[in-house]
Image: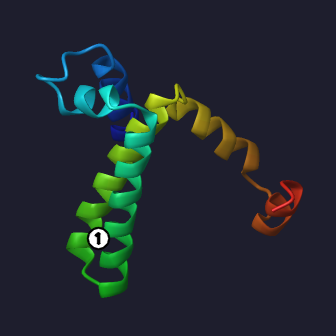
Amino acid sequence: MSVLARLAATIEARKGADPASSHTAKLLSKGPEKCAEKFGEEAVEAIIEAVKGDREKLTSEAADAFYHLLVMLAARDVTLADVEAELERREGTSGIAEKASRGA
């Protein structure tokens, strides 16, 4: 099991936990909108470090962004397996062709 799969499983297990005892449960208790906002903040921090070129800080911020992405997904009952299945569906398809198929 990958570290992301283990993290996703831990987040799922925290859904019913006491928000006073779990940071993840506290985030989830605030609702999907707050989880999405927090993911956005972490993504912006990763972008800033990417622009600055600090590899170590980018790595740390990327880890934070992954965690908050998984929390946001869990808040809407989207699993890591759902996202992996979508990536597998797209695998081998040109990015240009895939984007055109979505009308984007």
The crowd level at tag 1 (other Cα within 10 Å; few <14, some 14-19, many 20+) is some
Q: What coloring was used for the rendering?
A: rainbow
Q: Residue furthest top?
A: 16
Q: Which residue is found at the position 44% from the left and 46% from the top?
A: 36
Q: Residue at x 74, y 49 (%)?
A: 90
User: Which image quadrant for residue 104?
Assistant: bottom right
Question: Could you say which is closer to the camera, residue 25 or residue 94?
Answer: 25
Which residue occupies the foreground of this view, 73 or 5? 73
Q: Is residue 85 visible in this depiction of the protein? A: yes
Residue under numbered circle 1: 58
x, y percent for residue 85:
65, 36
Q: Quadrant of residue 67?
A: top left
Note whether residue 70 is visible. no
> Which x, y percent locates residue 65?
35, 54
Residue 3 falls in image quadrant = top left
Q: Is residue 102 left or right of residue 71?
A: right
Q: Quadrant of the N terminus?
A: top left
Q: Secondary structure at mark 1?
A: helix
Total numbered labels:
1
Amino acid type, callout 1: Leu
Give residue 71's position: percent from left, percent from top: 38, 37
Residue found at the very far bottom of the displayed protein: 52
Q: Is residue 8 left or right of residue 102?
A: left
Where residue 48 sits: x, y (%)? 33, 77
Residue 20 vs residue 74, the one in the foreground: 20
Q: In the drawing, does residue 82 fall left or right of residue 53? A: right
Relative to 29, is 62 above or below?
A: below
Classify 65 as above or below 49: above
Q: Residue at x 44, y 30 (%)?
A: 75
